[in-house]
Image (tube, rainbow, N blue to C red):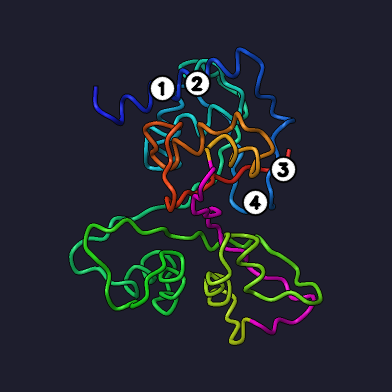
Amino acid sequence: MNSGSALRVYLLLMVSSMVIGGSIRIADVHTTRGTAMVTKYEVAAGDTLSKLAQRFYGDATLIPVIAVPNGIADPNTISVGQELLIPYITRRHTVASGETLSGLAQHFYDDGTFFPVLAAANHIGDPNVVRVGRSLLIPELGDVGHTVVAGETLSERARRWYGAAQLHPIISFPNRIADPDHVEVGRVLIRPGLNLRHTAVAGDTLRVLAQHHYGNAEMFPIVAAADHIADPNKITVGQVLFFPDLTDF
């Protein structure tokens, strides 16, 4: 069994044991911030969680990301007409030969000038240099809004939404804001979708981080699945983790 298969089996077993044991209730889950791109989906004939994971995330192994917050004990059994919460996971793109950030910005956003969004989200110092084979996060530039209040800056918004103040270009460029430290009170901002990022420190565990981020330590399998962590009991200091977004139940 390869590592991907082993991870999938382990997480599915964890999903089943947690839901059957009653340790996860949808009402117990909350987020530390609002969310932008979460989807509700009604199951149709022929749907499976693996098919839905492939459809929404491009990765059929991310079954636990859907199963856990929906309290599904048996990921092989879902019902036609059942309404599912589909957590938001930031899209990833693997760089191919000849691709540039401006070209990718044109492809994903229809605007090549939005390349600083990709550079900021991926901590790329020189936007003219991107390595073939690198996996890039592609923030979603939806129309979900946030109304600016007195005292807010884009750096503070970036810290609260994404976990790092230096990610403010992700907000400023699609909103065409020249000075990220001065934003008009009352202005409604496009809120780009990008999963909150956390760099692991000494003492962190997925359970501790799930408790902090979702208010429920037993949500750790969705973090493990989204970050392709083979052994959820082992994370390393300095490891960068991303947290799938859930709605406020």
What is the span of residues highlighted in magenta in the rendered image? Answer: 181-204
- Local crowd at mark 3 within 10 Å, few (<14), some, or many (≥20)? some
User: Dots 3 and 4: beta carbons under 8 Å?
Assistant: yes
Q: Where is mark 2, residue-wise?
A: 14
Q: Which mark is residue 248?
A: 3
Question: Is residue 91 highlighted in magenta?
Answer: no
Looking at this view, name the residue that lies furthest to the front.
202
* N-terminal label among 1 and 4: 1
Report x, y in % for residue 76. 45, 17
Marks 1/4: CA–CA distance: 28 Å
- Local crowd at mark 1 within 10 Å, few (<14), some, or many (≥20)? some
Report x, y in % for residue 133. 23, 57
Identify the amino acid type marked 2: Met
* N-terminal label among 1 and 3: 1
Report x, y in % for residue 120. 45, 70
Looking at the rendered image, the disc whose residue lies closer to the viewer, 1 or 4, is 1
* N-terminal label among 2 and 4: 2
Q: Choose top left, top right, bottom left or bottom right for residue 174.
A: bottom right
Marks 2/3: CA–CA distance: 23 Å
Question: Is residue 194 highlighted in magenta?
Answer: yes
Q: Where is mark 4, residue-wise?
A: 35
